[in-house]
Amino acid sequence: MKKLITAAVTAVLLLIVIMGAAWNDRGMDDISGMAAVSLNEIERLCEQGDTESARQAANTLRKELAAHEKESDHTLPLMCGVCIVFLAGACAYLIKVIIIPFNRLSTFAEKVAAGDLSEPLRYDREDIFGKFVWAFDSMRNEIIRSRACEREAMDSNKTVIASLSHDIKTPIASVKAYAEALDMGLDSSEETRRKYIAVMIRKCDEITKITDDMLTHSLTELNRLRMSPERFELISFLERTAQGLSADNSVHFERPSYSLYVYADMGRTAQIAENLISNARKYAGSCVDISVDRTESTAQIHFRDYGTGIPDEDMPFITDKFYRGKNSSSTEGTGLGLYIVKYIVTQSGGSLRLINHDDGLEVIVSLPLDKEQ
């Protein structure tokens, strides 16, 4: 930048010198022409013997030379003054348009490099540096957004770790208590012993479910949740799954009279059913009805409970990671169940819908039919 200013000043000074030289050359040419004419006239008068007229012509020439010299003495300083004013204006323009914006941009870059992103950089896109400054300020905003997302991700990870740690403590405490009871011989009868063992097995299943959620969370964070789609018959599969999850007869499957073949991951489809049935038991506290119908290209599985449903204000966010509805604050959970279901359904090429009814919630899972179907 200093080199640019130096070059501009040098160019203006050189212009002054060139203009002065040109002006002097012009003045010398004018004087030479005028003197030649006057000398010719004086010589002619002298040849004619008119000395008085020759003397008057010489005086006239002398006066004209003096007047021309006086005029030159005034014109050259005026020209230099104009050039100096031009130079001052050019320097002021360069300082305002280039020097000041560039210094402001340099200061801003130093602050960004030091991690200070609090101050925005004012800019006018019509200026010389306008687009560059706009891009620089956009980069600052992008860094702010990236840092905010990073903090949010860190907070979310802390939240899920704390939540899962809290959730896993309860079944572990129960297992420990019943194990100590068995060790102390408090099982006075075979029936009591079987009851203790059944509770311990159930609590171990809860621990397995929580650790599965934790593993699924870590895999989906890394986009490494592997899907192995295959062709299988959905109706028989859902019937077996419902029977395996309905030891207390709280899950009812309405079997249609036809068969449906879908193309999806069988294990992940079972995980969808397990999560939705578990959610219905936990939050609705009711039985679950499962039914199936089909469209031209998809099989639709309906999971219907008879609880209080999901509040309307929570519905747009209920499938987000770690989100828990306002009516679930009294129930332990991680906010991962519906997120995992939606992730698996989406990866399978299907869709997920949640519908509130007056007497409960209906979740509709759509899976793609096999092409042969």
Image (spheres, helix red, strand yellow):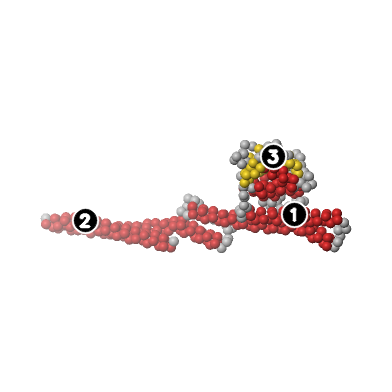
Along the viewing direction, whichever of 335 and 55 lies nearer the viewer: 335
Q: Are marks 2 and 1 in contact (CB under 8 Å)?
A: no
Along the viewing direction, whichever of 301 and 198 lies nearer the viewer: 198
Along the viewing direction, whichever of 258 and 38 lies nearer the viewer: 258
Q: Do the residues labelled 1 and 3 touch (CB within 8 Å)?
A: no
Q: Residue at x 80, y 54 (%)?
A: 198
Circle nearer the viewer, 2 or 1: 1
Q: Residue at x 81, y 60 (%)?
A: 179
| The image quarter in which residue 158 lies | bottom right
Residue 33's tag is 2
Along the viewing direction, whichever of 223 and 127 lies nearer the viewer: 223
Q: Quadrant of the C terminus?
A: top right
Tell which circle, 2 or 1, labels the residue nearer the N-terminal end: 2
Compared to 266, does 6 lie above or below? below
Q: Residue at x 31, y 59 (%)?
A: 18
Circle 2 packing at 10 Å, graded few (<14), some (14-19), many (20+), is few
Tell which circle, 1 or 3, labels the residue nearer the N-terminal end: 1
Residue that badge 1 annotates: 205
Residue that badge 3 annotates: 292
Amino acid type, residue under disc 2 in the picture: Gly
Is 223 positioned to the left or the right of 311 in the image?
left
User: How far apart are the alpha carbons under marks 1 and 3?
Assistant: 28 Å
Q: Is mark 3 on a helix, strand or loop?
A: strand
Q: What element carries label 1?
A: helix
Compared to 68, does 305 lie above or below? above
Amino acid type, residue under disc 3 in the picture: Val
Asked if residue 94 shows in the view, the reply is yes
User: How far apart are the alpha carbons under marks 2 and 1?
Assistant: 118 Å
